[in-house]
Amino acid sequence: MSAEPSARRLGALALVAVALFATLLTRLYFLQVMSTTDYTEVAAQNRTRLIYTEAPRGQIYDVNGRLLAGRRESLVVTLDWTELQDLAADDRTVIYGTIATELNSHGLKMKVSDLQREYERATDGSLKPVVVAEDVGFDAWVAIEELGLAGFAVERAWVRTYPYGPIGANILGYVGEVVSGEKAEELTLSKPDKRYEAGDEIGLAGIEELFEGVLRGVPELKEVEINASNRVIRDRQVLQTAVPGQDIFLAIDIDKQYIAEEILKEELALADARPACDGCTPHNARAGALVAVDVRDGSVAALATYPSYDPASLVYGISESQADYLLNNPDKPLFNRPIEGLYAPGSTFKPITAYTALVSGARTADFWWEDEGSYRLETCEADAAGCVFQNAGGVVLGPVNMELALSRSSDTYFYSLGETFWGRRDQYGENAIQDTAMLFGLGSQSGVELAREQSGRVPTPEWKRSLNENYPDSYPDPRWYTGNNVILAIGQGDLLVTPLQLANVYAMIATGGRRYQPRLVDRTVDGTTFETVVEFTPRLEADEQLDPAAMDTIRTGLRGVPQSRGTAEDAFASFDLANYPIAGKTGTAQVNGKADYSLFAGYGPADSPQYAIAGVLEEAGFGGDAAAPAVRRLFEYLLGIKEVPEAPLADGDRLSIDRPLIGEGNVLVEETQEPAATADPTPIQPSPEASPTTVPPTTKPTAEPTTTNAPTTTAPTTTTPVEETAPPATTVKPPPTTAAGDVEGALGQQRTIGRMVRFS
Amino acid sequence: MTFASTPSIRSERSVSKLANIDWALMFGVIALSFVGFAAIRSASGGEGSDYLKQAIFFVIGLPVAALVGMIDYRVYRDFLGLLYLVTLSALILVLTPLGSEVSGTQGWFIIGGLSLQPAEFAKLALIVALAAVFTGRFGSVEAPRLLVAFGTLGLVAALVLLEGETGSVMVYCFVALGIFLVAGVPTRILLMMIASGVVVFAFAFNSGFLADYQKARITSFLEDESSLSSASYQQRQSVTAIGSGGVTGQGYGEGPQTQNGFLPAKSTDFIFAVIAEELGFVGGAVVIGLQIFLASRILRVAQLARDGFGTLLCVGVFSMIVFQVFQNVAMTLKLMPITGIPLPFVSYGGSSLLSSLLAVGLVQSVAVHRYRGNPV
């Protein structure tokens, strides 16, 4: 044995060991002495999380302080994914099954797959437990607490309530849930102090949506220490205390809103049952709008739309069938017709043409025009098809001056003005009528405090040219024809207005040119101190100082409308016009392939105006038959002729599941149709072409379509050199340039409904 | 030598054996084990019985190790065949349904509440076998002897690889390397061994022989902070724990990384991170210092051994402990890849503690019987 190499090699081995240990100590020294601050910070971040809790959402009251959108505490079942994550998938499924069975036994629908989906969704989100079932009730609470299953607990949570149910839904809107983490981040970026997380409550329509930033409180932000399983070990500090959202007081009186909605609903039902004129498309009155504004300060008195929905049913998310009803129903219950609905104003537009004529001197007030029932364009030499424009139903009115032309709605009178303005455009300008329309606020938003308000459309030669430039295939003709101007003069063609704009036009007529921003919100109030934060004082949008002489003529004409031989004579038959004079105008707008749209707009009392009201009843026939009675009835309540009834509160305890989504709204149409079809076998005026949906009239036998001289235009669809290029008299064909400015385009907009498929 | 001339055989035997025990080595072992109990206790949040189980293993293992130390180490060479055979049998049996799989390795016998890992005890058999192979032939290693040595190592290593315990195989290799080095295997052959080891590793890494999780463990220590792999996460948490420990630590039982569960395998593989987080650089350095002290004592015994066999036994144990300490601590410091190699005497695990104690027993036997005058 040679000891020497062994000793040397032993030394080498020792040397290797020394090197290894030295490496360890050096590294240890580097980590713990040189860079300990860095790692201390990393470790701190490692276990620090911010947890935030939503503050109570602000409440919405009506002008008299009645609660329209409130909040209440609800018992909810929450799922805490951090407690479930360590379990095997099978064990989780067992827990889901137990919870679902328990909830089912308490009448709450829940499937294992629902809980699985919630769990998977939650794992992408925050540490906050997610709500999987709401309003579970005391018994279910006790039962679930007793089960003591990992990951599930029953907690209290704020839930939105709408005490008046569907009343004013189109104004209030509804709340839903922030659907995803990405969406929450997006929202947080735009409102950093309000910080959103998936599952938070957010306003998705109406005041709830537009005043989201006011109603939403500042959430509590708490720093907590967590462990590696993301479980909270202890609270560190509250970085931000919760601040409740501000409350909102509306300018609306819920009773007036209620009565407007009732009137609209009832008059639609009546109109639907009323037979159409001979040879006319049967009525299909299923939708409409009724708007009232206070001409003195712009406050909105009522903003009724039909059909509507119950926002309370949306608070917890809805089933697929409910979603289907809301989104795919042809009557579009989510569509807020007073501000989103775009309609041809028809004859309600005539005061604007009249004002143009009087002010420009194109026609004097005392010029007598011989209404022969039809009007042949001066540029046409013979009665070629398309050269002739008819009065509604070919009625012959005889000699009319401006006042009578308005009172009795002479179309031929205004046709001739339409041709005059275009024929002498060198003198009056290309856009004589259009300029007046814009003066009256058409073509631009009223500025009402609601989302998705439409601007409407005032068609001009320039507009038609640009349409052709951009969409030559759909709009091959860039030229503006005499025919375009002729039908514009009576509010047809491509002209589109919202019912709210129409009400504003009549408010301006009433006040001689003052137009307020429609005032929906009165004030916002601090959620804790109840002190006013922002007061929404009346805001005058325009004060046009309209020509007094011209306005006198027009007002006189409009006052004749509800009177003897006026187009709304029947509707105002028993109305006390002596004490409550009303000035207004009927309108009957033609829509291709549909029954006429019935319109009425007016103000009253005519000598000291208080309210302007506009009503639009879709596919309901003549303006004097359907819309005028609706407006008349609303005047009775607003002017104090009749006492406004109290709006009924919805049933107290609202559970989300198995409750009909839209109580009265949708049901009403079916109820009135079905019994009516069998109940009354003796219709006054049976319509030979009545379709199955047209129901013989059960009331109002006084309706006499043949004697009503509401105007109709003969749509210029025939082929003459002049007319073939005139636009079809439709209001529903969407020009691609202004998708938002159109009925169908607006209807087609995707709307968000919170938690749409949650309980499906 | 002085004791050898003492007249009374009985007193000479009893006195000399106890007197010749390397008490400093024993001190190191006991100190490290107690640090281990404390760390295991803290790692289980001050609750649980793991540290007590570890203590029971220690209480059983220490007398057994003492017994091993009292028996002349040359006796083990005499029974080498039997020892090696039993080891091979155990390693084969553990692959049968008699053995159990624990965290991915089919390497455990679970008897009652005890779980034993034959691969741990195979280390000892291997040390004895390799030391025996080279005995008395320092500096002149013939080719056949080298082949026998490789065979001895290869057979055990292959079986343990089948269990999936690559970490143990690495320990075997370094034990063999240490013994080869001191036994006088020519440097060029050692270099060739290391080179072929690298080649085999590279081949294994790229041939699909290793599972993805194994590869991830190997590469994780090279990954940057942003990596999301689980291995990388574990090492990042470990480094964070150690770094945030600072000079004096967060306090015993107070380390947030440990107590809040961020640290993985904290009572076993990452026990050093627990100590370093809670007791700081001071605690970490003490543990490493104790290991250095332990290693230096073993090296001292190797020097003093009465024969080559004794020296090589000590060298084997030395290599085993030094490599395990380095690999384990370097892993927690993110200097080396993650392997399941425990920190000797400290990591929770009965088999590891027992085999480490028995290894020290071997060294004690060499120390006790270091004088030529001693009776066998």
Image (cartoon, coloured by chain):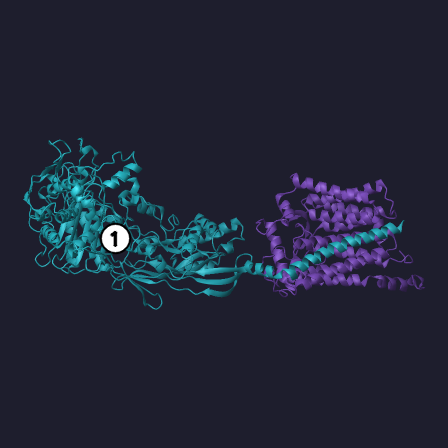
Chain colours: A cyan, B purple
Q: Is residue B291 above or below residue A709?
A: below
Report whether residue A695 is seen.
Answer: no
What amino acid is found at the position of numbered circle 1 in the picture? Answer: Ser
* Circle 1 Cα neighbour tier, 10 Å, few/some/many (<14 / 14–19 / ≥20): many
Q: Measuring from the top left, give residue B261's x and y in whole percent.
A: 58, 58
Residue A67 vs residue A320, the one in the foreground = A67
Pinpoint residue B161: horizontal percent, then vertical percent. Answer: 70, 44
**Residue at position x 31%, y 38% from top?**
A470
Can residue A680 be spotted in the picture? yes
Please state the horizontal and vertical placement of residue B106, each as a whole percent of the image: 67, 46
Q: Residue furthest front?
A: A426
Residue occupying image coordinates x 72% and y 53%? B324
In this picture, residue B326 sits left or right of residue A399: right
Point 58% across, 49% down: residue: B227
Q: Which residue is mark 1?
A: A446
| Residue B56 falls in image quadrant | bottom right
Q: How many badges with numbers are in the image?
A: 1
**Nearest the eye: B271 or A494:** A494
Q: Chain of mark 1?
A: A
Image x and y of residue A305, in percent: 24, 51
Nearest the eye: A513 or A600: A513
Label 1 element class: loop
